[in-house]
Amino acid sequence: MHRHALHRVQNRAPRRFDNHVGFYLSSARVSRNEATARFKTPISPMSDVFLQMSQKVLFTACGLALALQTIVLPQVLHVTASADQAQRRKSAESGEINSTQDALAQHGETARQVADQQRGRDKWLLAQKVDVRSDAKLDESLKAFEGETLDLVVLGTGKRYVRPTLERIISRNGKVNALRLKPQGETRGKTVYLKGIVKINAGRETVYESTVERATAAQLRGKRARELYEKKIEESQDRMRKRDITWWPRLSAEEHAAEVEQLQKFVAEVRTAFPALETTQTHEFIVATDIPSRQIGQYVKSLDKMHDMLCDLYGIPRGEPLWKGKCLVVAFLRQEDFHAFEARFMKADLRGAHGVCHQRSDGRVVMACYRGDDALAFAHMLVHETSHGFNHRWISPARLPSWLNEGIAEWIGTKIVPQCKQVPLKQAHAVEFMKANRTLGSDFFADGPHDKIEAIQYGMASLLVMFLEKRDRKKFAHFVRGIKEGQSVEESLRDAYNESLDELVSNFGQFIRVPLRR
Ligand SMILES: [Zn+2]
């Protein structure tokens, strides 16, 4: 069936038939000690291979992968299916070599460096004595957020603080003079003068916007960027209107709040069955979990990081609402509890699954999983599955073909959790397969609603996504956008990269130095 027709069917389908589930299954994992004993040298991740892309490095990875094949490999299954239908399962091989708990805490320092550079410019801006309208209500609106997270603070310099904590409001003569903010991921606070602020978003509403009589160049740039973004959305909607594609509605602050309330009610109901669940919230996620609080922090950070990275890739300004309310993540310590939760509250039989992302046609996304005994595999799975939810919520419910959806999930999973070696191992297996068969395997590009790539094709999918993204990040975003706006893969590929699928496969083959056909 042609992709357009598919989208129309999908968008018009009644809600209950459109509850897509992608799930990630893990069993029979190779023991860490066994793997470490066999491989004293850590495998270089495929991202390094991409930087060098020499046959030598590829052979090293493949050699290790071949050696790995002789021992019991972890099985990872991914399934996409309608909740109402029998789930089709296909297995994927993956590997686990290294494991450290602290592997996730990786970001933060660059933000501080930027802040240092910014300080000089803030001072310059203040010296310009920009006239800002003093908003009498501002004090009142901000008071409600003291100690809480704001959505966004934009400075006249163009700097954006996404999800800073408002530690304190500093007033002078009864008017807000400055804000004491703690930027996300940083431990130390920062004083930001109101005169330097262009915009404050809180509770998904704009609570402050400066009206400047003599706008600085930077302020004009910020305003222009905003206008461009709005224009981009209008153009996107025009294209979708022509293709009869229904896009996700932009929700009001009240609608977002109402959905968050619904999700919280749901969590409260779940807690009657699982009283050990505690709730943590970030700007984008509600995480209900019985994993100890000292452990969960890093996983939650990795979710926010994934969210921000995909925002950057797709050109969504950070802090813009994407989820319907928020994305709910229910993470259990024990497998039995995860399965019991799925059976009772989601009416799904997910025995054997490690994690699942429920993507409803009304826009709600609920991700559920259990930790198990491997911290890195869990972290990777969490990012992988939740990224499916992000792609579901971007622009429209139009479905990405399996290879692209899984390729992006694996790519972002390994970007956020590089210490998890599953993706490079799957890629090494895939390269071996492609060398032996000179093809991507049957039905790699099939994009029917129930088409799903094979286990061995996960490595190809992530390699191909990395190839597309490395060639040109903007074109890659353009390509994914086209599909979300209702174009077929071929049409969008032609638009973004000016090539056919056959040409893509042949260029990809040249890149990995394996002569390839579809
Ligand atoms: Zn997946």
Image: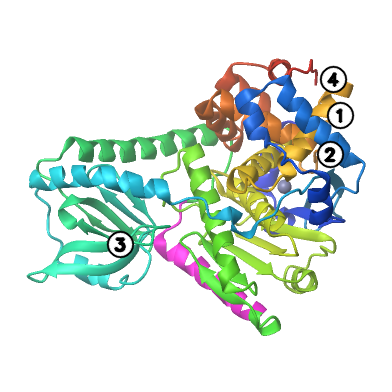
Q: Which residue is found at the position 73% from the left and 40% from the top?
A: 41
218 or 205: which is nearer to us? 218
Q: How is the image coloured?
A: rainbow
Using the numbered discs, state the Cα–Cα distance from disc 3 to disc 1 in whole angstroms. Answer: 55 Å
From the image, tell me which residue sits under label 1. Answer: 442
Q: Quadrant of the N terminus?
A: top right
From the image, tell me which residue sits under label 2. Answer: 454
Q: Residues within 10 Å of mark 2 (few under 14, many from 20)?
A: many
Using the numbered discs, state the Cα–Cα distance from disc 1 to disc 4 in whole angstroms. Answer: 12 Å
Q: Nearer the viewer, mark 2 or mark 4?
A: 4
- Do tag 2 and tag 1 residues touch (Cβ < 8 Å)? yes
Q: Nearer the viewer, mark 2 or mark 3?
A: 3
From the image, tell me which residue sits under label 4. Answer: 438
* Comes first in the chain, label 2 or label 3: 3
Q: Can residue 445 be seen?
A: no
Relative vertical location of residue 353 with respect to residue 278 in this rendering, above or below: above
Q: Is mark 4 within 8 Å of ligand 1?
A: no
Q: Which residue is found at the position 10% from the left and 41% from the top?
A: 214
Q: Tag 3: residue type?
A: Gly
Q: Tag 4: residue type?
A: Arg
Relative vertical location of residue 164 with respect to residue 128 in this rendering, above or below: below
Q: Which residue is found at the position 63% from the left and 16% from the top?
A: 499
* Comes first in the chain, label 3 or label 1: 3
Which residues are drawn in magenta? 250-270
Q: Position of residue 464 (x, y in %)?
A: 69, 29
